Image: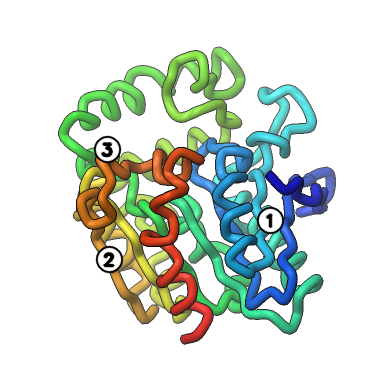
């Protein structure tokens, strides 16, 4: 694997995020990979290298309090999910534009990375967004096998565990991952609202104002999201031109795709069929 260049960006006073950049020769554009909730960018490094090999500069990053962007014990990290969009994502976009002002910019979003786009203050610099397995997190709309677990998580576990631990110790529980307290508490409030973050924060008009074209890629065997979750989230981007593609494992001769597995190195033989055409189309549009 090609070693990426590590970058530390100041997103706000006393707030730094770590990003990694792969640079291609004769790049056609820049791709920012926005991770899922509590998933360190290291999880996507093989995929980022593949994107670079296709002829793009690629930047991945960790939200503050996740992965490499932790500079103190997690109970001392103060951040909301909104802060991830307002400060961290914005800093990465600013960096991409400053380094490659002549190239078009693609926001390649996994899960929550696509949810947050409407809150990113400088998202006008993005030419196109591709969302992968992005939907709302409203607990009643998740897959049936997750509904009971979600109810227990939001109603019975997080209210007492976060104050006790000072953060959400998801790795020990095998749920999500380690998340700073305020971020997890905010995400909880979103997941309990029928209109998820857009309703909880009263951001209906803010999301409706987005006109960045969107390509949505979702999977029939996603273990977390239903078609209702996925369509509901993208419907909030009411004025964004959209293409929505629903892909079954059989469509790419795979046994499964799922919410996370698609980015694992073991799935690299499926990346061309899943992503190459959509990325090329996004830059050409």
User: Which numbered circle lies on residue 87?
Assistant: 1
- In the picture of the structure, the residue carrying the numbered disc 3 is 223
Q: Is residue 211 above or below residue 96?
A: below
Q: CA distance from mark 2 to mark 1?
A: 30 Å
Q: Secondary structure at mark 3?
A: loop
> Does the CB distance between marks 2 and 1 fall below 8 Å?
no
Mark 1 nearby-residue class (10 Å; few <14, some 14–19, many ≥20): many
Q: Mark 2 or mark 1: which comes first in sequence?
A: 1
Instruction: Give coordinates of residue 20: x percent, y percent.
Output: 73, 50
Q: CA distance from mark 3 to mark 2?
A: 17 Å
Instruction: Give coordinates of residue 61: x percent, y percent.
Output: 66, 49
User: Which numbered circle lies on residue 245?
Assistant: 2
Residue occupying image coordinates x 34% and y 45%: 137
User: Which numbered circle lies on residue 206?
Assistant: none
Q: CA distance from mark 1 to mark 3?
A: 30 Å
Mark 2 nearby-residue class (10 Å; few <14, some 14–19, many ≥20): few
Residue occupying image coordinates x 35% and y 28%: 154
Residue 202 showing in the rendered view: no
Q: Nearer the viewer, mark 2 or mark 1?
A: 2
> Does the CB distance between marks 3 and 2 fall below 8 Å?
no
């Amino acid at each position: 694997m090609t070693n990426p260049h590590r970058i530390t960006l100041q997103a706000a006073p006393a707030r730094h995020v770590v990003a990694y950049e792969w640079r291609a020769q004769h790049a056609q554009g820049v791709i920012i990979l926005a991770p899922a909730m509590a998933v360190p960018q290291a999880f996507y490094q093989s995929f980022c290298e593949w994107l670079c090999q296709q002829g793009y500069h690629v930047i991945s990053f960790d939200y503050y309090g996740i992965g490499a962007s932790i500079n103190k014990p997690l109970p001392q990290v103060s951040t909301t999910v909104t802060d991830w969009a307002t400060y961290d994502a914005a800093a990465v976009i600013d960096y991409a534009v400053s380094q490659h002002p002549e190239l078009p910019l693609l926001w390649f979003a996994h899960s929550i990375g696509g949810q947050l786009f409407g809150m990113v203050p400088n998202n006008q610099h993005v030419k196109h967004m591709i969302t992968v397995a992005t939907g709302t997190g409203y607990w009643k709309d998740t897959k049936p096998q997750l509904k009971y677990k979600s109810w227990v998580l939001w109603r019975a576990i997080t209210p007492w565990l976060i104050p006790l631990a000072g953060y959400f110790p998801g790795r020990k529980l095998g749920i999500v991952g380690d998340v700073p307290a305020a971020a997890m508490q905010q995400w909880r409030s979103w997941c309990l609202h029928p209109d998820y973050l857009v309703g909880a924060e009263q951001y209906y008009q803010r999301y409706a104002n987005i006109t960045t074209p969107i390509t949505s890629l979702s999977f029939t065997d996603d273990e977390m999201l239903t078609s209702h979750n996925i369509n509901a989230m993208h419907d909030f981007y009411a004025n964004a031109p959209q293409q929505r593609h629903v892909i079954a494992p059989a469509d790419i001769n795979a046994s499964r795709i799922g919410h996370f597995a698609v980015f694992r190195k073991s799935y690299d033989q499926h990346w061309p069929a899943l992503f190459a055409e959509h990325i090329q189309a996004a830059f050409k549009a």
